[in-house]
Image: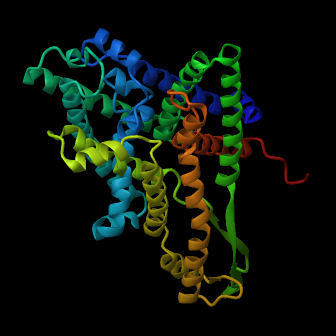
Amino acid sequence: MIVAFAHAFKTPDLRRKLLFTLGVVVVYRLGTHVPLPGVDYGAVQRCVDGASANQGLLGLVNLFSGGALLQITIFALGVLPYITAGIILQLLTVVVPRLETLKKEGRAGSARIIQYTRYLTVALAVLQGTGLVATARSGTLFSGCAVASDIVPDKAILTTVTMVVSMTAGTCVVMWLGELITERGIGNGMSILMFVSIAATTPSALWAIKKQGTLADGWIAFGGVLLVGLVLVGLVVFVEQAQRRIPVQYAKRVIGRRSYGGASTYLPLKLNQAGVIPVIFASSLLYLPALVAQFSHGDSGWKTWITQNLTKSDHPVYLVAYSVLIVFFAFFYVAITFDPDEIATTMKQHGGFVPGIRAGRPTAEYLRHTLNRITWPGALYLGLIALVPTLALATSGTSQNFPFGGTSLLIIVGVGLDTVRQIESRLRQRHYEGFLR
């Protein structure tokens, strides 16, 4: 990877793209430190210093915003509204015929779907911004902090509207920065910003573990966590690269005096076909009961049960529910994004077939059977990686966030591999060997 970046900076076009991407990333990181109007920054800092690591959906949003959520800045929502909007539209494409038609229209249909994603991002930003401002005003954003109710001193409606509008505008700026990287930089813009947000919180989490350690002034714990992180990165890279290659043979066709086809290729099926989406879905769904219990009044039985079982990440009920949801959403997401019938039909139309399998419906059944078999280990792998932070904290007995969590690892490794592939593909186009070698 280092060699690829070194060669990239020697190429003027790639160097401009990399420097432009770096400049946008700097602007984004500066925006994560600009406080939201109407917020007492001193009270926020006192609460952040004494707050423990948040779990559930708030912890997920704080992770994707690079720590800007708990700082209550203009970029507090980060890239999560855009990601959520993209996932929702991807799911609706299977259900809504209009979206499915747009998806098949090529570039024009994709542009229309992207426009719908922008509109939905703004709506989600308004909704999530209102929830965050209401939580900050009520003092429940930092439970246990003495000055939590003083974070928003002015409780007037105009101040609340100003805060929500500012946060929504910040989300639109983040969306614009991501699209600028996609158009004029390297890689997918929103993925790059998400990568930067997660990577920005890693050094502080590592240093916090070092400060809390007792052996050799905390350096043993620091080195142990770093070693575990490197091993996990290697494991994630190995699994993310794993794929089942189904051979595909195309029949030779003679049209006029020319013959077409007759080539052999393969259909790659990744072991982790769903990516990080099941982990995000499971975390969000598990946080909803805790959110309802937090804003409900009284001490009913269901509220006590939720507080005791679904708010502690090391509780057996939480661990079992989290694992089951990840496996379920892995199969669910693969089922709605990978259509064996459509792939089999497309292969048949172009004269392709799997050796030993008849074209058409038998090919679709074979693809479906193969996909179900490789989804099981992929789903179990996702569940294992997602439970790494909880297992690490339970083993070490620390109260700090484990810096190499499942969601963080999957996103960092996935975005890193995709960016390096794009750089290498551009380098091959410019530094190719002659035909006579």
Is residue 428 depicted above or below 265 in this figure? above
Residue positioned 67% across, 62% down in the render: 243
Q: Position of residue 309 (x, y in %)?
A: 37, 47
Q: Quadrant of residue 220?
A: top right
Q: Quadrant of residue 163?
A: top left
Q: Nearer the viewer, residue 1 or 263?
A: 1
Residue positioned 58% across, 59% down in the render: 380
Q: Nearer the viewer, residue 108 or 283?
A: 283
Q: Position of residue 88 (x, y in %)?
A: 34, 55
Residue reaching furthest to the right:
437
Could you tell me if residue 263 is visible in this image?
A: yes
Residue positioned 26% across, 40% down in the render: 122
Q: Position of residue 161 (x, y in %)?
A: 14, 27
Tell me if 375 is positioned left or right of 3 in this view. Answer: left
Tell me if 409 is positioned left or right of 307 in this view. Answer: right
Q: Quadrant of residue 355?
A: bottom right
Q: How many marks?
A: 0
Could you tell me if residue 405 is visible in this image?
A: no
Q: Nearer the viewer, residue 318 or 28?
A: 318
Residue positioned 21% across, 15% down in the render: 150
